[in-house]
Amino acid sequence: MCRNIRTLFNFEPPAGEDEIRAAALQYVRKISGFSKPSQANEEAFNRAVDEIASVSRSLLAALETNAPPKDREAEAAKAQARSALRFSQR
C-alpha cells in the first residue's frame, strides 16, 4: 500500500492538494489496515486523513532547502530505470 507515497518536497511545480491528500490516505490505510473502513470507522478514518493532510501541508510549507527543485518527469524516469534494472535481474 505505501509504495504510492512519494516524496512531495522540493518539486517544481510544488505538490498539490491532491498529491498531499493521496499520501495522507495511503498512510492512514497502511496504519489502520483498512483500504476502505466500515461505516463504524469511517468518520475516524476520514478525520485522520484530513488531519494528516493538514500536518503534511504545514510541514512542506516550513521545510527549506538550498537544492534546486527537482523535475517530476526526470525523477519518474529515474525511478522507472531503477525498477527496470531491478526486475530485469530476476
Image (spheres, grey):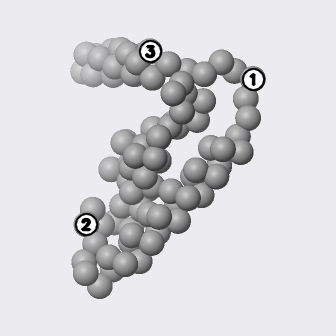
The residue beneath circle 2 is 36
**Mark 3 closeness class: few <14, some 14–19, many ≥20 residues within 10 Å:** few
Picture coordinates of residue 61, whole percent (x, y): 66, 44
Q: What's the residue at 64%, 52% (across, down)? A: 58
Q: Which dot, 1 or 2, sits closer to the camera?
A: 1
Task: Give the quarter of the image for residue 39.
Answer: bottom left
The kind of secondary structure element at disc 3 is: helix
Is 19 above or below relative to 88?
A: below
Residue 88 in view of the camera: yes
Residue sitting nearer the eye, 15 or 89:
15
Picture coordinates of residue 90, whole percent (x, y): 24, 21
Q: Amino acid at mark 1?
A: Asn
The residue beneath circle 1 is 66
Whichever of labels 1 and 3 marks the residue nearer the N terminus, that label is 1
Is 26 above or below relative to 65?
A: below
Q: Amino acid at mark 3?
A: Ala
Is 72 above or below relative to 50?
A: above
